Amino acid sequence: MPEPILQMRSITKRFPGVLALSDVDLVVARGAIHAICGENGAGKSTLMKVLSGVYPHGSYEGEIVFDGRTVEFSNIRHSEAAGIVIIHQELALIPELSIAENIFLGNENTRRGVIDWDATNHRAIELMARVGLSENPLTPVKHLGIGKQQLVEIAKALSKDVKLLILDEPTAALNDDDSAHLLDLLKGLQGKGITSIMISHKLNEIERVSDAITIIRDGRTIETLDVRAGDVDEDRIIRGMVGRDLDHRFPDHEPEIGDVLFELEDWRVSHPDDHSRVVIKDANLTVRSGEIVGIAGLMGAGRTELARSVFGRSYGSRHAGRLRLEGRELVLRSVHDAIRAGIAYVSEDRKGLGLNLLDDIKTSVTAAGLDRLRRGVAVDEREEVVVAESYRRSFNIKAPSVTVGVGKLSGGNQQKVVLSKWLYTEPRLLILDEPTRGIDVGAKFEIYGIIQALAKQGKGVLVISSELPELLGLCDRIYTLAEGVITHEFTREDASQEGLMRHMTADAR
Amino acid sequence: MNTLTKTLRGNIRQYGMIIALAAIVILFQITTDGILLKPLNVSNLVVQNAQILILAIGMVLVIVARHIDLSVGSVAAFVGAVGAILMTKHDVPWMLAVILCLALGALIGAWHGFWVAYVGIPAFIVTLASMLLFRGLTLVVLEGATVGGLPEGFKDIGNGFLPEVGPDTGLHNLTLALGVILVAVLVVLDYRKRLASRRYNFDVLPLPLFLIKQGVIGAVIIEFAYLLADARGLPIVGLILFVLIGVYTFIMKRTIFGRHVYAIGGNVEAATMSGVNTKRVDFLVMMNMGMLAGLAGLVTTARLTAANPKAGVNFELDAIAAAFIGGAAVTGGVGTVIGAIIGGLVMGVLNNGMSLQGVSIDWQQAIKGLVLLAAVAFDVWNKKRTAGGGGAGAEAPQTTAPPPDELVDKLDDVDIPEPAVPRP
C-alpha cells in the first residue's frame, strides 16, 4: 500500500465546556475520495477546521502528517500553501466580483505589483475549463447559480495547486443535475491525482463516489469502511452513525394526557416581505395538556415560521385563522401578548435569539418574566437570585453560582438557562424549536427529562426537531410538515422514521 | 496577598478607571504644587464640568442601547437660547421657563426617538442632522447675538451654592452633613448587598478588603465634602448632579426599564423574542437624552449668565468620550452611569490640571484625544486577556458516553420549580 497522503493521529479538541473531538484518527490514501459521515454535531466540521488551520496548532492535541511531513498549521494561508484547500458549505465568494477576480482573490496575477488582467482572464478560462464551467470570466459571481458558484470555488482551489481538497456538504444546496456534475468532477480530479475529503449526509452519493468512509460519532472515530472491498451499503453506514439504540437515549416516561389545551385552526401566514407568498397553508393542529407533540419537517418546510407566527406574530404577515388556548380564542399581536397568554417559544438559535451573552445566569433567567419581580418601581433582586438559584439546582446547570456569565457556559447549560427563562413566565404551552441542537449527549438526556417533567405538570409541549429519532423517542403524537402544509398526523404507535420521511417529502402542492 | 491580587485582577475593569482617575489627580496635585485640590479649585471643578457630566449620564444610556447622540451640544445651546429668550423677552417666570425648557428638550429627544425607533434611521444620521439643525436654529433664535440679563434665581442654578445653616464653624455645615449622610447610606447599602451575596454563596471581597474599600470611599467623600465646605459649600449644580447620579443608577440597575436597555444593547433580537418592546425602549432612551441635553443647556446658560450662539460646541464629543473612558462598549450592552461619571471626571481633571499648568488649549485637545484612545485600548486589551483565560466558572464535566444510570434515577425526581418560588 502506498504511503497515505494524510494521517491525523489522536486529535483531541476541547472548547470551553465541550470535548468536541476525542482521540480521533483519520488516514486518507493518496488519490482517494474519502468520505466522512456522522450526525449533526458529531465533530466532522471541527476535524476539518483542525486540519485546515482554522483552529491553529497548539489549540488541539495530536499530530498531523501531510504528504510525508509533520505539519503545524497556524492559519488557513499556511495550510493552503501546503496544498490543502477547504470549501465550506457557505461559499466564500464575493458576489460583486467577477469569476476571474474571485478565482485569484488573495492570489492575484501581477506584473511588477500591477494586476495583469490578460493573464488573469486567460488563466481563469483554463481553470474554468478544467471544472467544466463555460462562462465569461468577467461575469459577476452573483449572476451564477449555486451549482456554478461551487465550481468557481473548485477552480479557485485548483489555482492554488491543491493536493487535498476538502468539501463540506458540497451537494447540500445543489439540484440533482448539478450534484451529478460535481461528483463526476471529483472523479475526474481524482484521475489527475487530487485527493478529496468529502463531508456529506447524502449516503447514496457517498456510496457512489467514495473509496473509503470514516464514521465519526460524538467526537470519536468509530470505524473506517473500505468501499472498494464491497459490503458497504447505506444501512451499514447508518448503523455506524447512530450507534446507540433508541431505548437508552430517552428517560422512561408515562404520559398523562388531559384535555385539549391549544388549537390552531386554518392557520395561514404569508412571507413578511413578499405578501403573495403563503408560507404556512391552512394548518390545523392541537396539543393536549400533558402531551408532547412533535413537528417533523425538512429545512424550509416552515417549522420555525409556524412556531414564530403563533408566538405573537414574531414571523410573517397577513396572519389568518384561529388560535385557541384552553378553548378561548386569542389574538396575539406581539411577543408580549403571547407571553402573557401563556405561550413560550424556545428558539433554535440559542445565541442569536435566546440569550444576551453579556448577561449572567440570573438576569437571563428572569429576562422574559421581569414583571413577576416588580416591587413598586424596582426589580426585586433578592427574589431574582432565589428564583435563578432554584432553577440552577433543579436543572443541574453546571456553574458555581448564578452570577456566572451565560457566555461561558456550554451549549447544554445555556439551553437549560433558556428553558428556565421560559418556565419562569409560567407558560401553559411550550414551543421548543430544536431544543437539543448543538448539545452533547449527556445534556440532551437531561433536557429530555425536563421536557417530560413539564408535560407531567400538565403543560402542553410542541417540539420541532430535525432529528427523527428524537421526535420518535420523545413525542406522543407527531405532525409532518412539507412546504408549509401539514401532511400527516402520526400517533406514537404508528410513527416510524420511514413513514415520517415519506410525509415530510410528500409533494404538498 | 494572593486573594488581594486575585481580587484586583478580577475587577481590573471595574477599578481600572478609578485608579487612573486617582493617578491623574495625584499627578496634577504634585505638578501644580497642590493647587488642584485647593478648596476653591475643587469647587470650580464641579461647576465647570457639571454640564458634561449631566450629558454623560444620558449618553451612557444611549450608548448601552447601541445608539449615539451627536446633537446634544447643539440641543443644549438651542434649549438654553430659548430659555433665555423666554425669560428676558417674554418675562416668563424662571421656574416655569425651566420646566418648559426641559419639556422642549424631551420633545427634541422624542423627535430623535421617532426617527430612530419607529422609522429605523441610524441614530448617528438622525442626530448628525439635528446637530446642524439646532446649531442653526440657535443662531436664528438669538439672532446671532448673546442674550444676557437673566433673573438671579435662574443664574443660581449654574453659580449658586447651598444655603448655610447652623452655627458659624468656618466651614459649610450643610455640605459636611450631606457628605456624612452620603457615606452612611453607601456603607449601609454595600453592607446589605454583601450580606445578601454571602447568603447565596456569591464571591464577596474578603472582610479586611471590604473594610478598606469602605474606608477609602468614605475618606474620599468626606475629604471632598470638606474641601467644598471650606470653599463656598456644595454648588447647587453639584446637588443636581448627585441626585441625577442616584436616580439614573437606580433606573439602570433596579428597574425593568433599565434591564430592557441592557437587554436591547446586548442582543436586540433576543430582547424582542423575550417580549421587550424594543422600539419603545429606543424611543425613551433618545427622549431622555434630549431632556438631559436641555438641562445641560440651562445649566450652561445659567453659569455663563447669558445664552450664547457658540455655547455647547463639542459637548457631544466630551460626553461620548466620558462614556467610553468609563467602560461603555461601542457595540452596546455594556456601561454604567457611575463609569461615565468617572470618565467625565478624568476628562475634567485633565482639562483643569493642564489649564492650571498653562498648557495651551490646542495641546489639551491633543492630549485628551490620546487619553480616550488609551482608555479604550486598555479596555480592549483587558477584555482579550480575560477571555483567553478560560471561563471563570462552569467547569465542564461532559460525557460523550451514554448517560449513566444515576442520572437516569436522578431525573425521575427532577423537581421543576413551581410558579411560586419560596422566599428565603
Image (cartoon, coloured by chain):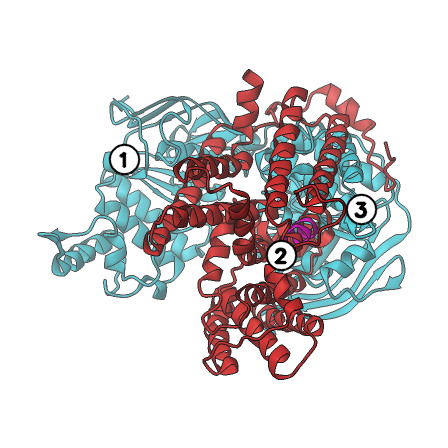
Secondary structure under badge 1? helix
The chain in red: B
Q: Position of B338 compared to B257: left or right?
A: left
Magenta segment, principal secondary structure? Answer: helix
Secondary structure under badge 2? helix
Q: Circle 2 sits on which residue?
A: B237
Q: Circle 1 sits on which residue?
A: A78
Where are the magenta residues, as a range? B241-248
* Cβ atoms at labels 1 and 3 below 8 Å apart: no
The answer to whether residue A285 is above or below residue B148 is above
Q: Distance between the residues labelled 1 and 3?
A: 54 Å
Count how many numbered circles sit on residues in the image.
3
Residue drawn at x 62%, y 32% is B219
**Residue nearest the observer in this picture, A205 or A41:** A41
Mark toward the viewer: 3 or 2: 2
What is the display colour for chain A?
cyan
**Residue nearest the observer in this picture, A65 or A393:** A393
Q: Which amino acid does label 3 sit on?
A: Leu
